[in-house]
Image: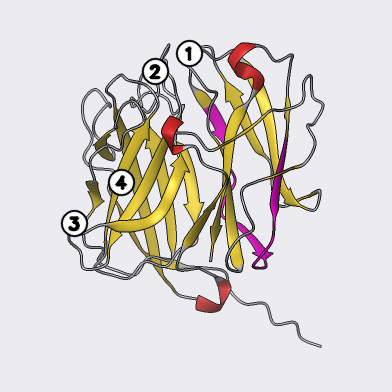
Amino acid sequence: MALMVPSGPSFANYSDNFGPLTADGTTGFGVGVAMGTSNADGSDTAILSALAHDCEYLWIGIANTSASAEAPAALMDLLVDPAGGASWSNLITDLLVGGAGNASFNSSSTSMPLAYHFPLWIPAGSSLGARIRRQSASARTARVMIVAAGGNKNPASWWCGQRVESIATFDAANSLGQLHTPGESGAFSSWTNLGSPNSARAGAAQWAVNSVTGASMGASTYDYQFGVGGVKIGPRAYVGASIGEVLCRLYHGPIFCDIPAGTQLQVRAAASGTLNGNQTNLDCAAYLVQ
């Protein structure tokens, strides 16, 4: 009996806002977004105007949200105007974006951007924007990058949703997601409920871990896992923290999964060493594409 195997996704269209190259490599990619300070929202900023094609896969990169001795916690709202202007509404709320490294691609202290992957449909003609709040009182300009892929030659090979539900008990007054204390020396904490049950069925997810509270991080590595009923779903979020208040995160994506409406997500975590001071907890969240 012949086995019919469909072809994989083949996107014909890619749009991005990376911008031109510059000699010093610091400002030639993405769009600068001035972050609001002391937990106040920054200004709404256009980051990609009037998509020429439908988007079925959205990649978001964020850099330069953190600096040494500054509280790294930060939240970003991704905005959309389907009419291609700047009359914004929320597309994804409360993305954890704290602890992202400097914006240079050619220095010895460069770190890769924090990246999120969403199989998300956005209609042609839409414009995308962003606003960011941070816990620190210091002014800072983040760099936000977008890649929008669409025109899949094999539609049956790719699922995408139309909205994203942010799951956590968010603390906007401190620019934080939900705090969770990991176990020490490689031992996992107990599974703990993350936010409230989701409102609609989801077909994909992204897991996120942001930063410690306050402005002092110790060097450590963390393993955050997300699941349901004590069973892990998808890959873990692996996080490295430096004493310079910068995080290195390994987020796999998109994470395709079937999560029915009314499901209570959970989180557990382990730290590589002994916790002390502000290392006692990091904030986390989940984002479900529906």
Could you give the CA–CA distance between mark 2 and mark 4, rounded to whole angstroms?
A: 20 Å
Is residue 270 found inside the magenta-colored segment of the image? no
Which numbered disc flags the more N-terminal residue, 2 or 4? 2
User: Disc 4 vs disc 1: which is toward the camera?
Assistant: 4
**Amino acid type indicated by mark 3:** Ala
**Amino acid type indicated by mark 4:** Ala
Residue 85 falls left or right of residue 281? left
Residues marked 4 and 3 touching at CB (< 8 Å): no
Residue 198 falls left or right of residue 3? left
In the rendered view, tell whether residue 268 sits above or below residue 116.
above
The residue under label 3 is 86
Picture residue at 46% right of the left edge, 26% below the top: 99
Task: Classify the position of the N terminus by image quarter.
Answer: bottom right
User: Disc 3 vs disc 2: which is toward the camera?
Assistant: 3
Residues marked 4 and 1 touching at CB (< 8 Å): no
Q: Position of residue 231 (x, y in %)?
A: 80, 50
Could you give the CA–CA distance between mark 4 and mark 1, rounded to whole angstroms?
A: 26 Å
The residue under label 4 is 130
**Amino acid type indicated by mark 2:** Ala
The residue under label 2 is 67
Which numbered disc flags the more N-terminal residue, 4 or 3? 3
The residue under label 1 is 244
Circle 3 residues within 10 Å: few <14, some 14–19, many ≥20: some
Q: Which of the 4 quarters of the picture holds residue 284?
A: top right
**Amino acid type indicated by mark 1:** Gly
Q: Position of residue 213 (x, y in %)?
A: 52, 22
Q: How is the image coloured?
A: secondary structure
